[in-house]
Amino acid sequence: MFDPAVGPGTFFAGARAVGYTGDFEGYELHETSFSEGSRLGLLPQDFERVVVGDFIGAQVSHTFSAIVSNPPYIRHHRLTEERKAQLRGIAERVLGFALDGRVGLHFYFLLKCLDHLAAGGRLAFLLPADVCEGISSRALWNRLCERFRLEAVLAFDQSAAPFPKVDTNAIVFLISNNAPQKCIRWIRVRERDSEAITRSLQGRADGQGEDAALLCIERKLTEALATGLSRAPRSAPSQGVPLSHFARVVRGIATGANDFFFLTAEKIAELGLEKRFFVRAIGRTRDCRGDRLQDSALAALEAQGRPTWLLNIQGTPKELLPAPLRSYLEMGEAQKLNERPLIRSRRPWYKMEHRRPPPILFAYLGRRDCRFILNQAGVVPLTGFLCVYPWDTRPDAVLRLWRALNHPATLENLAFVGKSYGGGALKVEPRQLDMLEIPRAVLKEVGLQSSPVATELVLLEEPKRTIRRRAKAADA
């Protein structure tokens, strides 16, 4: 049995506990981790064939019939360029194409392990749900399922989560190096009952069943891939219209240094700055508790000492600015803010991204029920929100769209486009929100129709996105 990230040997100990008597192999960066293995009942000889080193960078010369792992969860922004180049090579070898640069190290552990899975061998991997919920994940899993057999997927209720205090929604993937098949076994674990899981994987001839501990469903692979492997099957076929037919979605403003650019009214007065160089803004989702944002809410935030003013200089040369503002910008330069990666790309460095106040805000990450907010205060949002710009800007049309988006039936569909995290949190990126389906029954209820002009704008925009993606790929 092979583990590419052994740690103290938790999986080795589990294998011994169920009667496995064979050898263990693996990789581990930190030899000191092995000392904890004795407390798990492991012996020094259990680690004899474990290499102290980096699995991803290693030249592995043979295959393994059984692989199990909970790989390190390392996000893309913590990886060096050298490491990213190494990872691209792994993806191209296993999949035939490079992955989105935002894919974390944990998924490359899976790819490299699959590359070393023996014919007929089996693999069990614990991964975060976002590996099958992102924009590019469907093509990725389609390719994997053309080469390998996805045997089963185990998802977990919050009450049965493997890591209940961690903001990660864990999924177990069971894959074999056999010919692909048309169906998979999908299990929703409701209670921590390993015997029930084992029975479900081994004992049910029809692959279906439900009890207090779990729900087991035999799913068509095509349906599971289309819906998302971490998500339960839809109870009924889709009967909705994507949000992209009604609005354009853009991320909020990334300042690069909120403490410098996003100020309180008190701080502006203290520095002697003029408010004509600022716009009203909102930074945190917790600063907007309800489904409407009004001027009274901004006044309350100011009273609490919360920032609501965003420095908004659109490229005016520094020498033409008032002396107090020049001095403030020089303070930023003294702190070397102008050398930060995001900020230094601006010309001049203090030029802020431009956003029109969006009629509707979307709280893109969190557990809150009110996700779509009517922006009656006319603020611009920072990156805690997405901007929703309706194609039809008439006030009554904006109001209808806002009502349709906050309808419970629409909000339920967020689970089919967003990334899920621990504790029921959802994260929805702009291009994912584009795909949010508003049920036709909801559209009828609120009296909303997709205008022909809006549909044409969507159709025109899609080729532009394709061209931009191809140009970006060519530059890379």
Image (cartoon, rainbow, N blue to C red):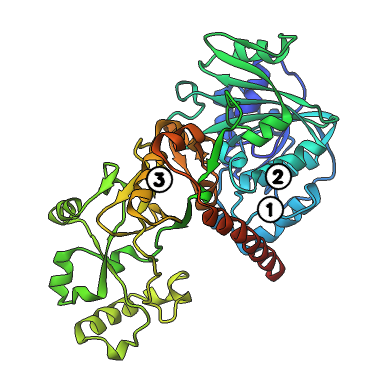
Q: Which mark is residue 381?
A: none
Report whether residue 139 is seen. Answer: yes
Please rate how many residues cluster around mark 1, counting C-alpha atoms within 10 Å: few if below 14, some from 14 to 19, many from 20.
some
Q: Which amino acid type is marked by label 1?
A: Leu
Q: Position of residue 52 (x, y in %)?
A: 67, 44
The residue depicted at 27 percent of the width and 46 percent of the height is 292
Q: Position of residue 141 (x, y in %)?
A: 71, 40
Q: Position of residue 143 (x, y in %)?
A: 76, 42
Q: Which mark is residue 401?
A: 3
Q: Nearer the viewer, mark 3 or mark 1?
A: 3
Q: Which amino acid type is marked by label 3?
A: Leu
Q: Which residue is mark 1?
A: 99
Q: Earlier in the sequence, mark 3 or mark 1?
A: 1
Q: Which residue is mark 2?
A: 140
Q: Secondary structure at mark 1?
A: loop
Q: Which amino acid type is marked by label 2?
A: Leu
